[in-house]
Amino acid sequence: MRCLHQIDATQSVARCDCGGNVLPLLNLDAFRTARLAHRLGGGYYVHSAIIDVAAGVDRSQPINWNITREVVRKDGTKHAFSFDHHLREAFENLRTKDDLDRVWLTGGLIALADTLDQKGYFDRAPHLELIRHLRNGVCHGNRFRIDNPNNLAKHPAHNFFASVRSPAGTSSEITAATHGKTVMFDFMGPADLVDLFMSVEVHLFSLAVVTA
């Protein structure tokens, strides 16, 4: 896949950061949404890396309650919190770590699905439709709601042909029987969702960029 990052001032072409050719853009919206999918997939790696760094804290040392950080309210007033204590919470409290994983990926699904929805899900490829169902599921108590199962015949939702999948060959599909099942992390795990973000990126680049 080409490492496309830049759009020129006319917003009509994309340039490869590795020094490759300037590629004409067919669909700027698809290009921008592909970049969002790229940031979301890579962002989960950033999240995981930060948790691993936090886990390297020297726990033999007592918490320094004098080291604080601030969170700012809209009116300029602030919360102050203990940096050492909450840094350790990221890896010592397993529920907090699980919440962090879920919140990141839930936010990613919502952000990507909302952007796709604004564009009518482009060509409604099955893995784009899968994003739609996943987003709806995490927004309804982390359980799938398949209100119109007959629509799946017209707009199937699966990752059978997605460009990034498990090397074990496992796949995910929404069917009428999916209704009521738990989304995260039963239907798909964290890496499955990252695979899906990456597949959306590749697919939308194929719609956005002239490669021939």
Image: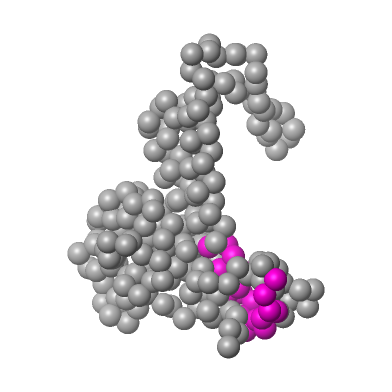
Query: Residue lying farthest left?
Result: 177
The image quadrant that residue 94 belongs to is top left
Closer to us: 186 or 63: 63
Q: How far across and down, in percent of the image, does residue 96 sit?
A: 43, 32
Q: How far across and down, in percent of the image, does residue 161 sit?
A: 35, 75
Q: How far across and down, in percent of the image, does residue 205 sit?
A: 55, 75
Magenta highlight on residue 133: no
Query: Residue lying farthest bottom?
Result: 212
Q: How far across and down, in percent of the image, does residue 64 sit?
A: 59, 13
Range drawn in magenta: 19-37
Magenta highlight on residue 24: yes
Residue 103 vertical placement versus 79 (above, below): below
Q: In the drawing, does residue 195 fall left or right of residue 149?
A: right
- Whether residue 126 is visible here, answered yes or no, is yes
Query: Residue lying farthest top?
Result: 62
Residue 76 vertical placement versus 14 (above, below): above
Q: Residue at the location (36% across, 64% down)?
A: 165
